[in-house]
Image: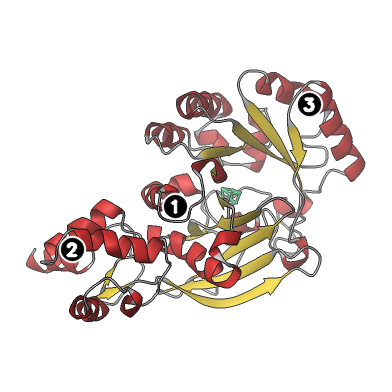
């Protein structure tokens, strides 16, 4: 018992801590948790606020840069605590459109991918919440990797820190939890990271520009709505028919459409935000006239919009599996599909496949492990 509680004291993060050393990891702690940590370790509570500001607003990575923290405390922090949870490994930039893919490594040696997508009117950072993913969506390379571990809140936030240091904090305008993993299956860490991202005095990015994307974990969608974080929600719909959706997204067997749509409507009502439906275009699977009809009917029920996404082939990842058989809907049919929805007064956008040339586009993030 004594051992356990002293370990807890050493390490204030209780969720999926990704380090094996004995120093406390401060990155990922909320303001209240930081204040409590300082008070428990014999310091004044307001030091927690100072350190919060340095770590999440000024993005400092060394305690000695925390100018208003006394030198003696900085030395103590250096000896007993860590700030950074990730290390830069590599990056690749698309010569076509400037999309940049970063590879980072956790302290327990897992690699993750993070993507920066510059567009005309915004620059979006797409962060990962898990190493791999257990949900096995057939159109997604991350799903083919399988699940390795949940990222801590610190590891989620440090993706932003490292990219902001490279690209400039003020140049990142939007954050999406849409990289590797299902954020709502790593609920506690995702929520903590969202709380930090969305807090005044951290990133300066408004809640309206922070989006969580989910494959549909209905009870957690409701729980997130009740958190009053009021960030935006994107729901990976991909079909309005349970049998088709289950064929490409096995999680649909556990949480079928009816349950998820009720949860998503609850989210829209509770947070007064407009839901985005993600819709990946699969040839002959979800691009028929009856799909337009069903999608139109659904979208008329509450405030939402549709993001249509051309599919990126996974043949190279899974040459003999179900995923390899999937093909993208031809461009002409995608345009026709979108036109049909627009004629029905549905707000719809075609999402560019930014980063396809460097395997950084939607559904392409994957790292091979030899374990
Ligand atoms: S689409 Fe999202 S939820 Fe599905 S396997 Fe890929 S990362 Fe996981």
Residue behind mark 3: 292
Q: CA distance from mark 3 to mark 2?
A: 56 Å
Res 210 visible = yes
Q: Does residue 82 appear to the left or right of 351 in the view shown? A: left
Residue 104 screen position, x and y as percent: 52, 72
Q: CA distance from mark 1 to mark 3?
A: 36 Å
Residue 240 screen position, x and y as percent: 67, 28
Q: Quadrant of the N terminus?
A: bottom left
Residue farthest left in this picture: 2
Residue behind mark 1: 197
Q: CA distance from mark 1 to mark 2?
A: 22 Å
Q: Does residue 104 appear to the left or right of 335 in the view shown? A: left
Q: Is mark 1 within 8 Å of ligand 1?
A: no
Which is nearer the eye, 66 or 253?
66
**Marks 1 and 2, the one that precedes in the sequence:** 2
Res 13 visible = no
Crowding near pointer 3: few (<14 within 10 Å), some, many (20+)? many
Name the residue: 58% across, 39% down: 234
**Marks 3 and 2, the one that precedes in the sequence:** 2
**Marks 1 and 3, the one that precedes in the sequence:** 1
Say how many tags the image has. Answer: 3
Q: Does residue 252 appear to the left or right of 68 in the view shown? A: right
Seen in the picture, residue 247 relative to 81 is either above or below; the reply is above
Residue 247 screen position, x and y as percent: 66, 39
Q: Does residue 95 appear to the left or right of 143 in the view shown? A: right
Residue behind mark 2: 38
Residue farthest right in this picture: 332
């Amino acid at each position: 018992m004594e051992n356990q509680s002293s370990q807890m004291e050493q390490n204030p993060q209780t969720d999926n801590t990704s380090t094996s050393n004995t120093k406390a990891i401060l990155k990922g702690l909320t303001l209240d948790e930081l204040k409590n940590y300082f008070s428990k370790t014999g310091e004044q509570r307001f030091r927690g606020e100072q350190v919060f500001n340095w770590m999440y607003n000024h993005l400092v990575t060394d305690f000695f840069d925390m100018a208003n923290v006394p030198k003696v405390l900085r030395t103590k922090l250096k000896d007993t605590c860590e700030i950074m949870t990730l290390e830069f490994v590599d990056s690749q930039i698309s010569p076509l459109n400037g999309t940049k893919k970063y590879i980072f490594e956790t302290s327990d040696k897992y690699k993750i991918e993070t993507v920066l997508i510059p567009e005309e009117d915004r620059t979006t950072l797409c962060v990962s919440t898990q190493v791999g993913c257990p949900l096995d969506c057939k159109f997604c390379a991350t799903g083919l990797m399988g699940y390795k571990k949940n990222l801590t809140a610190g590891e989620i936030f440090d993706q932003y820190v490292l990219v902001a240091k490279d690209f400039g904090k003020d140049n990142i305008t939007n954050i999406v939890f849409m990289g590797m993993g299902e954020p709502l299956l790593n609920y506690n860490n995702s929520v903590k990271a969202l709380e930090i991202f969305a807090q005044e005095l951290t990133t300066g990015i408004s809640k309206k520009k922070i989006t969580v994307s989910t494959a549909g974990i209905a009870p957690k969608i409701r729980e997130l709505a009740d958190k009053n974080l009021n960030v935006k929600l994107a729901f990976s719909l991909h079909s309005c028919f349970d049998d088709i959706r289950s064929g490409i997204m096995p999680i649909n067997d556990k949480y079928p459409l009816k349950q998820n749509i009720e949860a998503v409507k609850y989210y829209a009502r509770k947070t007064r935000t407009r839901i985005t439906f993600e819709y990946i275009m699969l040839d002959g699977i979800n691009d028929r006239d009856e799909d337009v009809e069903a999608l139109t009917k659904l979208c008329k029920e509450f405030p939402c919009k549709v993001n249509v996404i051309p599919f990126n082939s996974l043949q190279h990842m899974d040459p003999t599996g179900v995923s390899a058989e999937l093909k993208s809907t031809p461009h002409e049919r995608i345009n026709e599909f979108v036109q049909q929805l627009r004629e029905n007064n549905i707000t719809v956008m075609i999402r560019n496949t930014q980063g396809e040339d460097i395997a950084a586009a939607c559904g392409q993030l994957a790292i091979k492990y030899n374990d």
